[in-house]
Amino acid sequence: MRNHNLREILGLSQRGGRMLSLLDLVESNTVDLPVASLLAGAVASGASLLTAARPGNAGKTTVLAALLSFLPPGRRIVTLQEAPPRSVPPDTCLLAHEIGSGSWYAYLWGSAARGFFAAAATPEVQAASCIHADTLEELRMTLCGPSIGLGEKEFAAIDLVAFLRLDRTFTGYRRRVCAVYAATGTPGATSHQRICRWNEATDSFTVEAVPERWAAATERAAEFLEAARAAGSTRFEELFARWTTT
C-alpha cells in the first residue's frame, strides 16, 4: 500500500525533478508551520481537498502532492482517468490530476468530474485534485455551472480548499497559500468558512480557526513536522516514510 501510494503521488509530477515536501514548502514560505500543520491535520482526518489558483505554475500540484503524504492509515490512492464506479470502496482516496477540460492523463471534466465529487460525499472516501480558480465564488461558478453541474450539496461536501497566489518579484516568482477554506456542513452561500489567510503586506500567515474535527490531528501534525525538521528529515520521500510508519 505504501509503495503504491508513493507511486501515485510521484505520478503527479509531469515536469520531473525533485518532489517538494511540506517542510520544503515551509522553508520557502509557501506556507508557515501552523498553516502546514492544519492542512496536514485535515487531510489526516480524511478531508477531501482541492488546491486552486487561476494561473498555471502557481504550485497547485506541488501543494497537493505534499499533502497527500498525510492520508489516514490504510487509505489507498486511486487515480482516475474517467468517472469513478458507482460504488467506491471505503478507505479510498480518489485522485484527479486536475479538474479541467484538457485531454491529459487524469484530467476530469463534465459528468466525470461530477461523479468524482459525488463519490467524495460518501463516508470514508476522500477526493483530491487541483483546479483553476482564484476565489471561492469562482470555484463555485466553475463546479456548479453548466459544464460540470455540481449540486450545492456536493459542493458543500468539499472539505478543504487551499487557494494559492503567484507573484513575480525582483528575485523571481513568489508562491503563497493565500487563503484556506473549510466546509461548514451547510449548503448554500455559507458552505465554507475561511480558516487561514496570508497577509501580503507582511508576507505572513494567520490561522483564523481550527475546526474541532481536525484539532487533534492538527496538533499531531505540528509535533510530527517539528520533530522531522529537527531530525533533518525534510525531503519528500523521508517525510512520506516517516509519517506512514508513525
Image (spheres, grey):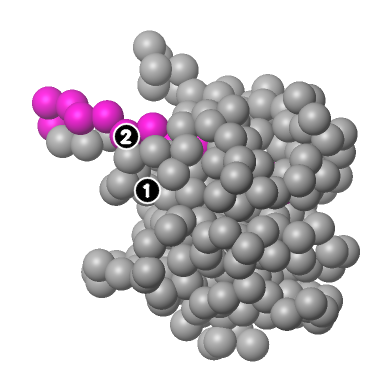
Find the magenta span and give its range: 158-171
Residue 180, position in %: x, y? 60, 34
Q: Can residue 52 be seen here?
A: yes
Q: Residue at x 47, y 38 (%)?
A: 133
Residue 95, position in %: x, y? 58, 68
Earlier residue among tags 2 and 1: 1
Which amino acid lies under the numbered mark 1 shown in the image of this protein? Gly
Residue 117, position in %: x, y? 70, 58
Q: Residue at x 49, y 43 (%)?
A: 52
Do the residues under discs 2 and 1 have CB atoms within 8 angstroms? yes
Quadrant in which residue 90 is drawn: bottom right
Under tag 1, what secondary structure?
A: loop
Q: Alpha-carbon distance for marks 2 and 1? A: 8 Å
Based on the picture, tell me whether residue 122 belongs to the magenta stretch.
Answer: no
Quadrant including the N terminus: bottom right
Label of residue 166 in the image = 2
155 sits to left or right of 64? right
Q: Residue at x 55, y 41 (%)?
A: 142
Quadrant including the C terminus: bottom right
Q: Residue at x 86, y 38 (%)?
A: 185
Under tag 2, what secondary structure?
A: strand
In this view, the residue in front, 56 or 154, is 154
31 sits to left or right of 140? left
Is 131 drawn above or below residue 113 in the view shown? above
Number of numbered discs visible in the structure rendering: 2
Residue farthest top in this picture? 201
Which residue in the structure is indicated by mark 1? 59
